[in-house]
Image (cartoon, helix red, strand yellow):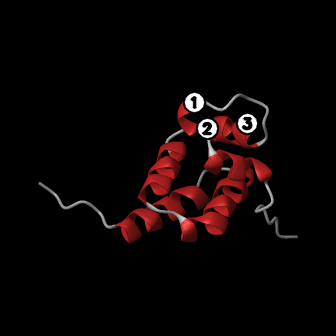
């Protein structure tokens, strides 16, 4: 049986996955969300984000932009923060 990764290792993996989505728009939205809020996450919050990362970018972005309904399992405080979009910093 392999050892479970530490919380810090899981955070590092989530950061990489958040910033390497495949499109610049998704990187800014999902990576920016990670950068803004991950320091305050506990295990359940990280688990929520890991589950979000398993979803398609177009779905995540639609939930954040409020153009598609958020599935029940993702509803709550975390998605409300993502929907604020006040964390997106697009370099010029």
Image quarter of residue 52 = top right
Query: Which residue does the image show at 70% across and 37% down from the upper left?
Result: 63
Q: Is residue 76 above or below residue 15?
A: above
Query: Which residue does the image show at 49% across and 42% down from the upper left?
Result: 54
Q: Residue furthest left?
A: 1
Q: Do the residues labelled 1 and 2 touch (CB within 8 Å)?
A: yes
Q: Give the labeled residue for mark 2.
A: 75
SS label for mark 2: loop
Q: How many marks?
A: 3
SS label for mark 3: helix
- For marks 1 and 2, give the CA distance: 5 Å
Q: Give the labeled residue for mark 3.
A: 62
Residue 31 on image: x %, y %: 64, 60
Q: Which of marks 1 and 3 is nearer the N terminus?
A: 3
Q: Residues within 10 Å of mark 2 (few under 14, many from 20)?
A: few
Image quarter of residue 85 = bottom right
Q: Earlier in the sequence, mark 2 or mark 3?
A: 3
Foreground: 49 or 15?
Answer: 49
Q: Residue furthest front?
A: 77
Q: Give the labeled residue for mark 1.
A: 72
- Looking at the image, is mark 1 or mark 3 nearer the viewer? 1
* Image quarter in which the C terminus is found: bottom right
């Amino acid at each position: 049986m392999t050892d479970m990764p530490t919380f810090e290792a899981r955070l590092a993996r989530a950061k990489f996955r958040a910033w390497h989505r495949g499109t610049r728009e998704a990187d800014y939205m999902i990576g920016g969300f990670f950068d803004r809020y991950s320091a305050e996450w506990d295990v359940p919050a990280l688990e929520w984000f890991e589950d979000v990362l398993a979803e398609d970018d177009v779905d995540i972005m639609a939930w954040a932009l409020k153009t598609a309904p958020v599935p029940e399992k993702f509803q709550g405080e975390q998605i409300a923060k993502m929907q604020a979009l006040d964390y997106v910093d697009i370099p010029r």
